[in-house]
Amino acid sequence: MDEKVTLVGKSLEELELFMLENGQSKFRAKQVYNWLYLKSVRDIDSMTDLPLSSREMLKDKTQLCSIKIKDKQVSKDGTIKYLFEHKDGTYAEAVLMRFDNRANLTACISTQVGCPMGCSFCATAKLGFTRNLQSDEIIQQIFLIQADTGLKVTNIVYMGQGEPLLNFDNLIASIKIFREQFQIGARRITVSTCGLIPQINKLAELDFQSTLAISLHAPNQEKRQSIMPVAKKYKFNDLLSTLKDYTNTTGRRVTIEYVLMKGVNDSVEDAKQLAIAISKLKSNVNLIVYNQNEKSEYKKPTKETIQKFKYILEASGKKVTIRLERGADIDAACGQLSAKMKQ
Ligand code: SAH
């Protein structure tokens, strides 16, 4: 049996315990920890400050990761999309984005294989749901991106496949490792959700210093429930009041994400309704221009419509950004992740 212990995902305390149990001194764990989290080492042989005997033991009993890079595509704009294969043969994707004008290196990671939420405009929804990722499978996405590129990821967005708040404990466990071990600041981490009220309340109770982004995508209940089934369970007004409580408890501003789709939610009236609905909510707005995929029934609005929509929200006093489209030529943009294997 190849039941090797997986190193990436373990805390320093867990590594110490493992080293002690295998006849090593405790301080060797700190060396392994540095290699894993600060240097993203490619293999155990490269852990050069460990004695040969320690490296032999590690090679015998452990593996760095349980997931592996199955495929990798590079976009014209430098965005890289990774397809990861898990031990059970399932797949998930992550995307690494570089922005020319910034030093940031942002990774967009997945929390589930597929997604059960069924949003009508999203390619991931078409996959259906297979399972939650374990926390170490989430963590290894960042490790493998860093090991593959030799670069340090500075920002993480939980905006890949799946609904992060449905995998709550593993989400929180992975954020802890990113903060404490990969040394990525809480403020550089964003979790996006389609709006699960009980879990948002749970987050408010934690010392969650990361940014919460809400996929709102509509200015009222009727429109929202026609494109997002989750709105039937968690109503528009209840979601907004939950978010108000959240900002009051945490003192943190939330991000309202809004995918603009031609003729669906992009009218002047929609913009006005949205501005009123969120006027009392401590929030910024992030407009996302709809990315088409091969099966899409929706279209992106014209530049003029987008600017008008933005202007109306800005005139109401909101800070509004338009999300830059990245990696569309390799299906790596928002809502395009469908973990399809190249034929
Ligand atoms: N389930 C979480 C995390 C996914 S984040 C959530 O719903 O927030 C991915 C973001 O891309 C979400 O805001 C999603 O609604 C949006 N999205 C989905 N399909 C899209 C598309 N075709 N074009 C642009 N954005 C899309």
Image (tube, grey):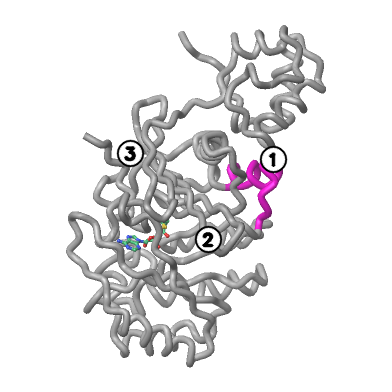
Look at the image and give the residue range highlighted in magenta.
172-186
Question: Nearer the viewer's eye, disc 3 or disc 1?
Answer: 1
Q: Which residue is mark 2?
A: 100
Split into 4 quadrants, where in the image is the C terminus? Answer: top left
**Which amino acid type corresponds to the residue marked 2 in the rendered image?**
Asp
Which residue is under mark 3? 130
Seen in the picture, residue 342 relative to 256 is either above or below; the reply is above
Residue 137 on image: x %, y %: 50, 35
In the image, 212 versus 329, the foreground residue is 329
Q: Quadrant of ligand 1?
A: bottom left
Q: Main secondary structure of the magenta part?
A: helix
- Say if mark 3 contacts mark 1, CB within 8 Å: no
* Side of 79 where 183 appears, left or right: right
Residue 120: numbered disc? none
73 versus 294 height, above or below: above
User: Label 3 to label 2, Cα distance in Å?
Assistant: 36 Å
Q: Is residue 174 magenta?
A: yes
Q: Could you tell which of marks 2 and 1 lies nearer the N-terminus?
A: 2
Could you tell me which secondary element the residue under label 2 belongs to?
loop
Front in this rendered view, residue 304 or 310: 304
> Helix or strand or loop: what does disc 3 sit on?
strand
CA distance separating discs 2 and 1: 27 Å
Mark 3 residue type: Thr
Q: What residue is at 30 percent from the left and 54 percent from the top?
A: 329
Query: Which quadrant holds residue 215?
Result: bottom left
Residue linked to disc 1: 181
Which residue type does callout 1 highlight? Answer: Gln
Question: Which residue is pictured at 46% across the width and 8% down the height?
Answer: 1
Residue 278 in percent (x, y) is at 48, 82
Residue 51 position by quadrant: top right
Residue 289 lies, with reference to residue 180, above or below; the image says below
Q: Indicate which disc, 3 or 1, sits on the residue closer to the N terminus.
A: 3
